[in-house]
Each structure stands twice: as structure tokens, then as C-alpha cells.
Amino acid sequence: MLIGIDPVISPELLDTLFRMGHGDEIVLGDAFFPGDSFNPRVIRADGIKIPELLDGILSLMNLDSYAAHPVVMMNVSAGDKLDPEVEKSYREVIDRLWPGTPATERMERFAFYERCKKAFAVVMTGETRTYGNVILKKGVIPLGKKM
């Protein structure tokens, strides 16, 4: 354990966040997401829900303030129902830690999968709510922000 680092952040995830550059993306996949099918760098965070991971991750890195949408989620497929509480629980963490972050972009399922192939890494979580996958784009540390 390290002081000031949330215990949901594993050593492998901490290393990954450190190695990511500005503009790199990390996918937080729900428990059903086919992470190994889309990206060679998969980190396991089984049993950990995405809001908990967002709190740990976004206390260590900021979102890209130059991107129109540094937070992306999968759009609901035809015939499925979207649970608005999923995005709401994510935005509560995002907006608390990085207020002013633009609205979450929604992306068609297969376009989302293609984007995941280009991501720096995929974190497989214990999130069991449907359409819980989210992509975060890393930014640069704002001027005047203590590191």
C-alpha cells in the first residue's frame, strides 16, 4: 500500500496510468466486456465497480481538457433499455474531481469496440450493470496544479 493512493489501484494499473501519455485512452470495461478480444493490454480489477475505479483513477490523472469528449460510453443497441443511473454514478465522480468536464459522448457499439482496439489499455472490472463500459482520455496536468 502507498499513502494517498486508493487501494482499488493495483500496481499494474498504477504503472499503466503512469506510462500513458496525454491523449492516450483507457477503457474501463464492465464484467461482460470482451477486453482480451480487443486489446493486448488487459488489467484485471475483478469485483471493483467502475465508480470506485473512477474515484481512484481520476485522483491520479486528469481528463483531456482539449478533447471535445474525454469521456465516452457505448450507446444502447436497438431493443435494449439504458439505465440512466449508470452514467449518473460515473458523472458524479467525474464532476466532483474534474468539474467542467464536457458531457459524455455516446458511441455506437461496434464503433466503440474499434476505438477500444486503439486504447492504451483495458481494465476489466466487476461492474455488472449493462452498458457500463467507459473510455477515458488522459490529459496534461493543468498549470498550477500541484503534482
Image (spheres, helix red, strand yellow):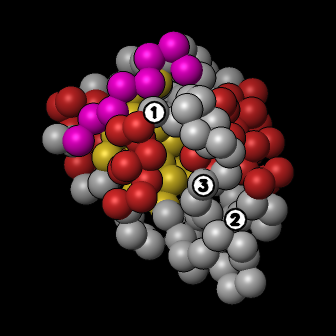
Whole-number angstrom distance, CA of label 2 to CA of label 3: 19 Å
Q: Residue furthest bottom?
A: 143
Q: Dot 1 corresponds to which residue? A: 10
Where is residue 108 drawn, in percent x and y? Answer: 42, 45
- As for residue 47 lying within the magenta part, the answer is yes
Q: Quadrant of the N terminus?
A: top right
* Residue at image point 66% right, 32% down: 51
Other-residue count near label 1 (Cα within 10 Å), few / some / many at <14 / 14–19 / ≥20: some
Name the one closer to the observer, 26 or 20.
20
Q: Nearer the viewer, mark 2 or mark 3?
A: 3
Amino acid tagged 2:
Pro
Q: Dot 3 corresponds to which residue? A: 60
The answer to which image quadrant residue 31 occupies is: top left
Name the one closer to the observer, 61 or 89.
61
Residue 122 position (above or below residue 100): above
Whole-number angstrom distance, CA of label 1 to CA of label 3: 13 Å
- As for residue 136 lying within the magenta part, the answer is no
Q: Nearer the viewer, mark 2 or mark 1?
A: 1
Residue 36 position (above or below residue 72): above
Q: Dot 2 corresponds to which residue? A: 102
Residue 84 position (above or below residue 134): above
Q: Which residues are magenta?
A: 41-48
Amino acid tagged 1:
Ser
Where is residue 119 drawn, in percent x and y? Answer: 31, 53
Task: Give the mark nearest the N terminus, 2 or 1.
Answer: 1
